Image (spheres, helix red, strand yellow):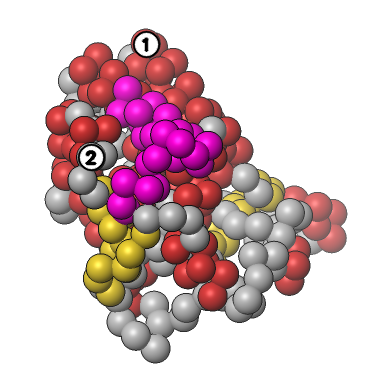
Amino acid sequence: MTYHLHITNKNYSSWSLRPWLLLRELDIPFVEEYHEMVSGTFAQPQWRAFSPTARVPCLHVVPKSQNTQENKEKEEPLILWDSLAITEYLSETHPHKPIYPFHAPARAWARSAVAEMHSSFGAIRSQLGFNLNIRIRLGPEAFSPDSEAGRALVADLKRIDELWTEGLRRFGGPFLAGGEFGAVDAFYAPVVLRLGTYVFGEGVDGILGEEAKGYVEFMVGGEVKGLVEWVNAARGETAREVVHERECLEGRGKEVVEVLGVTA
């Protein structure tokens, strides 16, 4: 069988990054199927041609070619259209890969942390849009206790710090659930990269503790080759999507301080 992973712009698509990075780091071969966005809208209905939800990532598991009519049904690919479903499928089909840790306590923790990332952290997603081509300074207004948005963002970041610190302390690092890269690191990799895009201003530096900061430095320091590859590819993209660029700058206390990628 062959894996075909359907993704979109690396500069903007944090959900595409998660299974892509997991496959790449664990040396599971796959074919990258890249689809440009139609500019000016989040909705991409044309993607329904390969994804039931018209969203990415979407994994097609293509069996070896069957030439007889009798086996035609076997030629149809298995389709998984959600990052968590893709991860669970890969864990089942590659039991000897450390997608989840082999040690039961670490495995339970990692699986729960992956599910939490999949279902939570709405303030981070909505207020810190994924964009690898710019750096944005966040002023105190972004974290104001006087606004619901500010309180929600601080709560999400504090939970990230709590979760990462727990994993690193319990399982010894350098990855979140121990000594090997796994699904939990792939799922939190977009948060790691967001913390490079957004520069915390005065008064908010204390949200992340030393362990969490050290994890960010480790992840972006070159040890995780797939992450370096993704970031370099993202910064080489020239396509700029207005809705995604606007999303990054919405809200109070944001200022672009550096452009990192190429310009169109």
Q: Which residue is mark 2?
A: 203
Could you tell me if residue 130 is visible in this image?
A: yes
Query: Residue 186: x percent and y percent?
Result: 38, 42
Label 1 sits on residue: 105
Residues in magenta, as a range = 138-162
x%, y% of residue 153? 43, 38
Q: Is residue 168 left or right of residue 189?
A: left
Disc 1 marks a residue whose amino acid type is: Pro
- Residue at the front extreme, as displayed: 146
Direction from residue 38 to residue 172 in the image, left or right: left
Which amino acid type is marked by label 2? Gly
Closer to the chain start, of discs 2 and 1, is 1
Secondary structure at badge 1 equals helix
Q: In the image shown, does 198 or 250 lie closer to the viewer? A: 250
Q: Mark on residue 241? A: none
Q: Quadrant of the C terminus?
A: bottom left
Asked whether 76 or 183 is in front, the reply is 183
Mark 2 crowd level (few <14, some 14–19, many ≥20, 10 Å Cα): few
Please report contact status of discs 2 and 1: CB closer than 8 Å, yes or no.
no
Any part of residue 167 in sight:
no
Q: Residue at 73% of width from left, 71% of height from top?
A: 46
Could you tell me which residue is drawn at 39 percent across and 78 percent down? 237
Residue at 63% of width from left, 76% of height from top?
40
| Distance between the alpha carbons at the discs numbered 2 and 1 | 36 Å
Of all residues, the one furthest to the bottom in this rendering is 264
Number of numbered tags placed on the structure image = 2
Q: Main secondary structure of the magenta part?
A: helix
